[in-house]
Amino acid sequence: MSKKVIVIGAGGVGNVVVKKCAMNPQFFSEVVLASRTLSKCDAIALEAKNIGLPIEIKTRRVDADSVPELIQLFTEEKPYMVINVALPYQDLTIMDACLATGVHYLDTANYEPKDEAKFEYSWQWAYQERFKEAGLMALLGCGFDPGVTGVYTAYANKHYFDEMHYLDIIDCNAGDHGKAFATNFNPEINIREITQKGKYWENGQWVEIDAMSIHKPIEYPNIGPKESYLLYHEELESLTKNFPSLKRARFWMTFGQAYLTHLEVLQNVGMTSIQPIKFNGMDIVPLEFLKAVLPEPGTLGENYSGQTSIGCQIKGLKDGQDTTYYVYNNCHHAECYKEVQAQGVSYTTGVPAMIGASLMIQGEWMKPGVYNVEEFNPDPFMEMLNIHGLPWHELHNITLPHEY
Ligand code: NDP
């Protein structure tokens, strides 16, 4: 059975989600794209039509900071579920509107208050009882990381380990978009994530480190060694809760030297601050202004070369023996552009969101309450990754490129 979905957010990721949904009428009967700027929705809908996708995308304008506007939209459109790929600031307003109108919910990034660069699941997990009582489901963090990294970990746990002890999520973008400085997803969210303190899980507690202070080269398949930086990433919170045997869990991401140099200068001159300043009598937030002058993630796709590689490296026990496992996907920016006019980071986020939504619609991943992806059977999701553009590879009992 296929059902109607509303996608909120007409950015880099929203472009991929609606096109992947519109390619799959076996899961989705109607696709509506709603965002703050209607012209962005219309441009995506027209592209989808021009490339001949079988479902026509309907467009609507909505300010997702406003619960009444969202309620009006959901009441008029009557979707089965909403895929939220606007910004993390809108997670709670959209969840409130879902509860008010009886709509299921999915997102790819956890809630963040706008005035504090702090991301954690507590705000959204607090909706558990309300979603349960309403008979509705909210699936949190269903992009690539968070998202596929949680599914990979659940798959490893189900099939290859009796006990997982060490988890390293490694995320490399070895692409080149030809711009001096640009971020691959929303610049404001990206810079807030990188400039806050790093953190990893070890022996039952969080270890905090100065931002970007731990780094080393990691070898990525078909790419080679790339300097990788230990960051805090939100899936570490849910994975260490859902897999308590983990003694350590870390997240690593690559950055090029030119990117880091630009970021350092921007930080040094105060452009990454989220504290408002007075400018010509107006209050402006430097980071919001910086976002306005940087390229939008959705515009980076054309002529983007190279590939991404994201995976999980796990060490633990099977039948009393030490065992290691590495599962990953490599994704070429140029192929994503050819298929849906997007760069690889938007693509690797948007495809899993479509897959998660289709599993909810088919009832395979459907139970009332608020959940992270690793709480469901990973097998159908893993199968769909291979079919819908993000094939994965696995290596067993290797000396992991990453030392323990
Ligand atoms: P973009 O900046 O390209 O797009 C965000 C979109 O949201 C814009 O179209 C914007 O509209 C819209 N928007 C912002 N505020 C509102 C609002 N109040 N009401 C309605 N629409 C709004 O970002 P991305 O597409 O790159 O990222 C989207 C989301 O995906 C982010 O939350 C990001 O954190 C997440 N993400 C998750 C990843 C994962 O692997 N889990 C990886 C990458 C991203 P307008 O332009 O008109 O303001």
Image: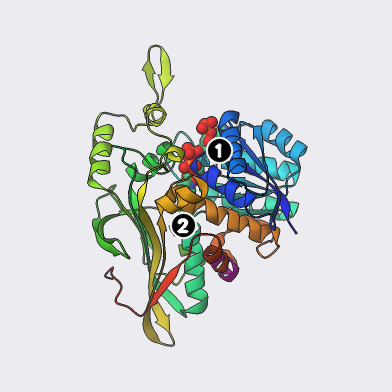
Farthest residue toward the top?
281
Q: Residue at x 42, y 57 (%)?
A: 331
Cβ of mark 1 under 8 A from ligand 1: yes
Q: Residues within 10 Å of mark 1 (few under 14, many from 20)?
A: many
User: Left or right of 404: which side holds 205?
Assistant: right
Relative depth, front residue between 323 and 24: 24
Q: Secondary structure at mark 2?
A: helix
**Side (left or right) of 228 relative to 359:** left
Per the image, the residue denoted by label 2 is: 235
Q: Is residue 8 left or right of residue 217?
A: right
Regarding residue 244, the answer to whether it shows in the image is yes
Rendered image quadrant of residue 387? bottom right
Please give the range of residues in magenta. Answer: 377-382
Residue at 69% x, 31% y: name it: 68
Quick one: quadrant of the N terminus?
Answer: bottom right
Which label sits in the foreground, 1 or 2?
Answer: 1
Hey, what amino acid is under mark 2?
Answer: Glu
Mark 1 or mark 2: whose residue is earlier in sequence: 1
User: Going 40% across and 44% down the picture, which residue do you hit?
Assistant: 184
**Residue 314 location (% of width, % of height):** 39, 71
Location of residue 261 (image quadrant): top left
Using the image, tell me which numbered label, if any, was put on residue 52: none
346 versus 316 height, above or below? above
Mark identifier at residue 10: 1
For disc 2, the neighbor class at 10 Å (few under 14, some 14 to 19, many from 20) is many
Q: Quadrant of the C terminus?
A: bottom left
Name the colouring of the figure.
rainbow
Give percent across and percent down for residue 169: 38, 62
Q: Amino acid at mark 1?
A: Ala
